[in-house]
Image (cartoon, helix red, strand yellow):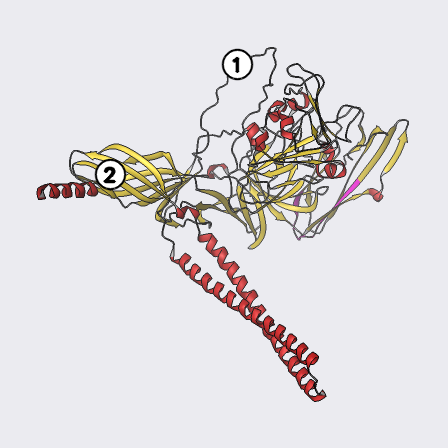
Amino acid sequence: MKKLLFLLLVLSLTCYANNKPVPSKIETATIYLEGATIERIADVNLTPGEHTLIFQNLSPDIVEQSIQISGLNKATIVSLQYEVNYLEKAAVSTNYTRLETKLKNLLFEKNLLESQLSGLDEETRLLENNRKVRTETATISLEAMKELAAYYRTRTSEIEKEKFELVSMLEDTLKQIEALKKEKFKLEDVRKEKRGEITLKLTSGVALSTKLQIKYNIAVAGWFPSYDIKATEVGAPLDISYKANIYQQSGTNWDGIKVILSTGDPQTNNEKPDLTPKYLNFGHGRKSVSHPTTADVYKYNPTIRSVVGTVTDESGLPIPGVTILEKGTHNTTTSDFDGNYQIQVNGGRALLYSYASFHTLSLPIYSNTINAMMVPDVQRLNEVVIVGQGKPNGYAISEGKIYTQEDAIVKLLSGKVAGVQVTGTGGASGAGTNFIIRSKSSIHGDNQPLFIVDGVPFTTSGNYYGGGNSVTSSRFLDIDPNEIENVEILKGLSASTLYGQQGRNGVVLITTKNGKGIENVIGNYKEAGITSTSFEIKNKHSIVSNADMTVLEIDAFQLDAKFQHYTSPEINENVFLTASTDSWEKYDILAGDANIYFKGTYAGKTFINPSITTDTLEISLGIDPALVVKRIESNNYKSKSFLGTNKMVTHNFNILVKNNKQTTVNLTIEDRIPVSQNKEIKVLDVLTGNSTFNEDTGILVWNLQLKANATEQKTFGYTVKYPKNEQINL
């Protein structure tokens, strides 16, 4: 019996010895624009037989399919498993512990100050009550009353002084608490509350010592570029500092590791497209609507907290009323009359731009300034909308009374909205459905409301609809009614104020439960190139797992540049200094923000965009206040006349520019003459001065050499003829 117990003990110890945690450390991190590949090493001594090795305290966000094991020597893998341990927690840093202790002390001090203030308030109430009791229940001599009044006055004054000092101390303490909380947040990482584990079973026929390499991918890391551009003098080369801003939130600090930066993105779909024949035939159902996937030029920047920009069409004209949605949130804004917008970022990674009859545009939040160009969806403008089954007599939702119809849109609105009439236009497959907000019917038939699903607009009219990538009306009608959180109707002034002409027939605001209703309908796909460049950083670095950025310099170089001043006074009455270079391609730079320094002084920010298709990269170096420009309409006068059924409007402009510098500058001035897109609108009597004029675009260009302290004037004008009963956007 004793021998049996001894044998069992030996076997259990052997199993325990063969099933053990193995320490490992990170040696290299290859960081992509989004994501990273981590390489760990572990020294392992194996005896003959089977062994279970457990690698602990790993990121809980490891992509399991990416795990690779090498350095096995003569050992063989039996099995490999990855799981998340919710009980194990990573150790916090010394700095975090210090901040936590300091915060606890400040919170105790805050409570103490609040208690003292509360005590003084209570004393004030007691003094007041005691004064009332004495004066109302006892006869007090004049002398005693004076003494009593003096005491109350003195003590009340002392209390107010003490309260003032305590409130001041409390405000200071609260500020310190808030600052500490922000610092503590930067060091926090929720992934430290759970840890990843890789369990590796190996078998070996011989005893061996080996160095295992464990490689895996994580998504909670990345880097984005930024630049410092220094110009010492006009005409001198630009000094460029190319920097990488690295972030990682794996829950594990990377201490003294080798860093490799890659311009690749392992999350990109690298499968080449397969172009198949396109066959035409008659039939019912959805139309095939598609447009090419765009190249993935910009990458998410987690430091951005607010974004401003302008939304334009392909011709550069601003688009008012565009809905800008922060993806994954309910946070939206709209562009104003000039196409400008501003939005605070609440943790989303991309912005979705949508407007009826335009392709929806999705851009990652890559900069504080994001200008968006939207492309018209011509097919939507001409497409006949196919909708769900209707019935000959139609059904309606009116005055809160609901008549059942099989169309999903009726289910969507059923019981939620009064004052919306829904009628079928026929019983055959593909028959239409009309939606009319009460009091908004139109004899012209163009009476369909605008639908906004989670901030994305589109209509159900037969003439057009918009707001999504190839969204058909029937797909909109297929939205699951159970996913609807709320439906709201806007009419009249409130609808047209928020959504302009598109909201003239009313607006139906639909909010889905997960805030991604439009994405449930359309789905977005991207495809980008598979080539990349890697930068191996010379020295080893430590990168902490928190909300902070680690900034490393990738490269430093000089670029020969041609300096030019530029102004477009109709848009902005400032003169900008630009530098253009054609030698940038060899440095593998990416799109990113840049800090500008001119003659040793910080001059602001610009954005470098190397994704252009020209050979020259133009960099804006900011406003030059020594050059002044004014655009003035001649005599502040618009000439108007009527000729039969037409109206004639004449505009003449003077552009005045002065160089207050002591040196000659090269200055480009651009302005424009409107271009007609309607045969009934004529642009006549065009005066271009001595500019270079492009008749197709209407752009006027003057290239000047403006001498020191010199002033020049440029003049242009035009006349527009159009039907007097129409209005145009002059």
Residue 503: quadrant of the picture: top right
> Could you tell me if residue 621 is visible in this image?
yes
- What is the C-alpha distance between the residues marked 2 and 1? 53 Å
Question: Depth-wise, is mark 2 or mark 1 nearer the camera?
Answer: 2
Q: Which quarter of the figure is the N terminus placed in?
A: top left
Label drawn at residue 604: none
Relative vertical location of residue 339 with respect to residue 233 in this rendering, above or below: above
Q: Secondary structure at mark 2?
A: strand
Q: Amino acid at mark 1?
A: Pro
Q: Could you tell me residue 493's position as x and y percent?
A: 76, 38
Callout 2 environment at 10 Å: few (<14), some (14 to 19), or many (20+)?
Answer: many
* Tag 2 residue: 52
Question: Looking at the image, how many numbered discs can be counted on the residues?
Answer: 2
Q: In the visual, does 364 lie left or right of 426? A: left
For the stretch drawn in magenta, the main secondary structure is: strand
Look at the image and tell me in which quarter the C terminus lies: top right
Q: Residue furthest top?
A: 282
The percent coordinates of residue 61 (x first, y second) are 40, 40
- Residue 114, compared with residue 137, is above or below; it is above
Q: Which residue corresponds to the image point at 66% horizontal and 53% vertical from the top-left?
A: 662
Pinpoint residue 191: horizontal percent, then vertical percent. Answer: 41, 46
In the picture provided, is 360 more to the left or to the right than 422?
left
Left or right? Give the position of 513 relative to 416. left
Identify which residue, 124 or 652, lies in the foreground. 124
User: What span is in magenta?
Assistant: 653-667
Q: Is 171 in front, or is 623?
A: 171
Disc nearer the start of the sequence (2/1): 2
> Where is residue 328, by image quadrant?
top right
- Which residue sits at x=45%, y=62%? 104
The 10 Å Cα crowd at callout 1, few under 14, some 14 to 19, many 20 or more, is few
| Relative to 700, 87 lies left or right | left
Label annotation for residue 277: 1
